[in-house]
Amino acid sequence: MALFHRGVDWATELIKLSDAVIVSTEYLKSQITGLNKRVYVLENALNEKQLKKSERILPEFSKKKSERKEIVLGYFSGWPNDHDYDFATVSDSLRGILSKYDNVKLRIVGYLEIGDRFRAFGNKVEQIDFVPFDVLPKFIADVDINLAPLEDNPHKRSKSAIKFLEAGILGVPTVAGNLEPYSSVIRHFEDGVLCSNSKEWFENLKVLIENPSLRAKIGTNALLKAGAEHTTVVRSNKLRDIINDLTSGRIIDICEPVKIETSVKEEQEEAGQLSPRQYLANKYIKGSGVEIGALHSPLPVDNKQVNIKYVDRKPVDVLREHYPELKDELLVQPDIIGEAEDLSVLPDSSQDFIIANHLLEHSPNPIKVLQEFHRVVRKYSGIIYLALPNTRADASYDKDRDITTLEHLTKDYYMGDSARKLVDFKHFLEWAIHAGKIDNIEKALEKAKERYAEEYSIHYHVFSPGTFVSLLDFTRENLNIKFDILEKHIDGYEFIFILKPVY
């Protein structure tokens, strides 16, 4: 206890001595405003990894729940002794619900002492040990109603609404105690349900259990709220405002999104830092593998840890003729001649890594490329390092082109050989009009025919981070070509995905 009080004293002094303090809730702010005049609130939020995982698993569990007859109430307790008093505030109501409905189960995930009165319900109460954070979303997605009771005391009022957000992004409705933090976030019976006493817990749960359409409506609204208002992207704007307020706007330019690649590189080099490309290469590129289409810009790798071979569709002398705009650049000598859509020169599961920077947009059939990557990279341990241009940047000549739809990409994949030439030519014509900025249709046709005859490597497609993730979702669900996204970086020049095939 003495150690605890010393810690409180230390934290109090730290707050007093700080120029400003950032806390996660308004209640916390109200408790320390007397210790520091500059207290800001930056609420907890969902990160991008959580959002993408939720997108992947939501359809599977929505279907599963629609097909089962039982209704599962979920309580996710976390660490030992941390939630026993919270759960006690609703235990009578829950026992009443379990007694009333034969088709209702209670699932508890994490450490919690439930007592004999709950054990008496037998298999209607399921208790699962503490699970790692990265698999927790699957357990949340599998329940029909998320329970978030709170004991009323300053410690619990200081908590954030993260339980509501973690369930909301999975379309699961939350029933919560009518206290901060939930009362300021949840709209009662719109995107969640609030309860002030045992009677309200029983009655409100009864309403949700008996009204599946209402559960679906509240879950959908929670999903929309969590995804639109409570992400780290949204919070980053608020953090920028806080920093600018603290510094009277002096560092606003540092917080602005970068516009071009060179400024990113220059700033990082001046600071003695690695560029995002180099950082991710050092972190993930190990062993023996290939880089496809490197031309004049191969990815720098650690030669002590990496044995790399280069793949391109033509020998270097032909490439130099093909790209006269690169006549003054040093081009990589290909070790292997091959196409990204057909890597039959490489055996199955043979490469520790594949590097494909600014390659996929040059392919008439991106899904086929991903299929080949999945085949060639080593099972269970292989890495795909893939970068695509940020076509919304001011410097991009694709900035006026529409983002390619998933429907377009799937049609390109399923297209028969007989129609392939015509479809490919249409790509060249669209490129000539929009990327080449040729308004006259006759001149655009002439330029398209010229480039088509040369087999020039145009940008067939225009990607955004969102459409690329949708493409990965499509290949996972329809073609059994599955990738996990290990890491992602986005700046004003490009977006980089680190992918790992799964089976």
Image: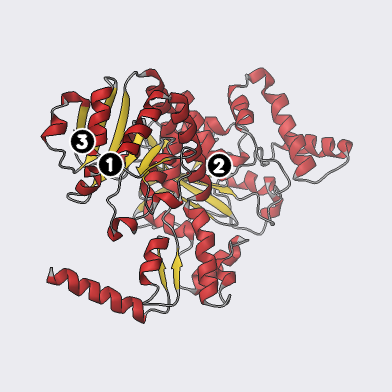
Camera-side residue of 170 and 329: 170
| Mark 2: amino acid | Gly
Q: Which mark is residue 169?
A: none
**Disc number lying in front (1 or 3):** 1
| Mark 3: amino acid | Ile
Using the numbered discs, state the Cα–Cα distance from disc 2 to disc 1 in whole angstroms. 31 Å
Q: Residues within 10 Å of mark 1 (few under 14, many from 20)?
A: many
Camera-side residue of 189 and 29: 189
Classify residue 294 as left or right of residue 84: right
**Disc number lying in front (2 or 1):** 1
Q: Position of residue 1 (x, y in %)?
A: 13, 68
Residue drawn 53% across the image and 46% down it: 228
Residue occupied by mark 1: 76
Using the numbered discs, state the Cα–Cα distance from disc 3 to disc 2 in whole angstroms. 35 Å
Q: Position of residue 305 (x, y in %)?
A: 34, 54
Using the numbered discs, state the Cα–Cα distance from disc 1 to disc 3 in whole angstroms. 10 Å
